[in-house]
Image (cartoon, rainbow, N blue to C red):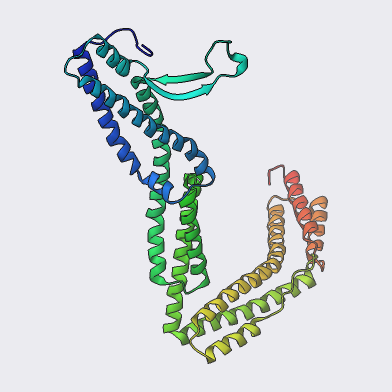
Amino acid sequence: MQGNPGHILSVAEIDREIAERAREIETIAATLVELDKHPGLVLLRRFPPAGVTAQRWAPARAALESMWEDFGRLGTVLDRAKAARGRRRLDALDREELTRLLRGQPVEVARHTIPMAQRSLSGPREQVELIGIAELLDRMRAAFPAVVAVLDAVEAVNNRIVADLAPLRAELDRVGETVPELRALSADIDALAAEAATDPLALRPDALDHRLGELSRRLRAATAVLTELRAMSSDWDGAVARVRAHVEELHRTYERAEQARLRVERGILAAPLPRPADDSAVYGAELAALHADPPAPAALWELRQRLTAALANAQHTEQLAQGLLDRRGELRGRFESYRAKAARRGVGEDPEVLAASRIAAGLLERRPCDLAAVTRAVADYRQLIAQKSGRRS
């Protein structure tokens, strides 16, 4: 009696075993049907997985297929047991057969050819792998969590994508793809949705948070642009006047930057400063052409963006020159402050202090003024005052 565990079950034990296994199989059947409708599995069937998802799904899919195969084997064994038990009276041979079905290893799950070198002359050519109901159940229980883990992970990413992308797509549909930023945003939303469909497990939570946040930020920025374009269209003359003010400010900034550059060139030893051409007139002409053919809010907005960038560059150029002028003024102020301190401490007429004072004053008055040399001279003057007065400066 192949696979018989030894103890022959009584009729009562057989009935209890059949009833218990039937309840287990019924529960498993309900779970497998529910698993077959799992949203993660539906997605994997609808969108063939790729990349990381394909790698993780391959063993889980094999485990799921094995679970269904084992479930079929369970049903076959139980049906055979029920048919055997259906006999009116059970003799010893019947109970032995039922014991083998319920407690033994009656199910063939695989056959393996034994290599010639491992056989005996009269031994079998094949090794038959047998398994029983208890082992089948154990295999299914072991496989179930791994399958569910992958399916739950796929579902979690999909839920996150749907929850975050759906409002973005709805807002995008509402405002329309009327500017390049919105068209690019629409393409990126579609790309993320496609990626999440085919390889959701490649999207780590932190990376997904960043990408969804960036899409939301871009939508807000693009929507703000649309709002501004509508405002420009409704108040065209006012919008043009505000851009004209930008053009005038750009011209004034260029003038200030050039004046500061010339002052630096005449009075301070420094590397050549940038000298950008004043292109405010070009912007003014472009603005005049737009004003003559209203309304063109998108063109006016784009002109203002370029103006803003040009103004920032001009202001930077002005700040470079003005920073050198301000540094010379700061050094002059510090020198005067230290000279007053020397007088208060009674060391102003000390020969060494006087010599250091004359050196710093001479460097400050020299044209062009070497700011690095002045900085060292003023620092030396301060230290000498401290030494002569016996105090910390």
In this view of the protein, which residue sits in the foreground, 333 or 162? 162
Q: Residue furthest front?
A: 122
Q: Residue at x 29, y 31 (%)?
A: 28
Say left or right for 75 vs 250.
left
| Image quadrant in which the N terminus is located | top left
Q: Measured along the vertical axis of the image, is residue 89 above or below residue 148?
A: above
| Occupied quadrant, residue 227 | bottom left
| Occupied quadrant, residue 151 | top left
Residue 297 position in % (x across, y down): 49, 81
| Occupied quadrant, residue 100 | top left
Q: Measured along the vertical axis of the image, is residue 331 above or below residue 317?
A: above
Q: Residue at x 27, y 36 (%)?
A: 30
In this view of the protein, which residue sits in the foreground, 183 or 278? 183
Q: Residue furthest bottom?
A: 292
Q: Measured along the vertical axis of the image, is residue 245 above or below residue 378?
A: below
Residue 255 position in % (x across, y down): 67, 79
Q: Residue furthest left?
A: 88
Q: Residue at x 41, y 63 (%)?
A: 169
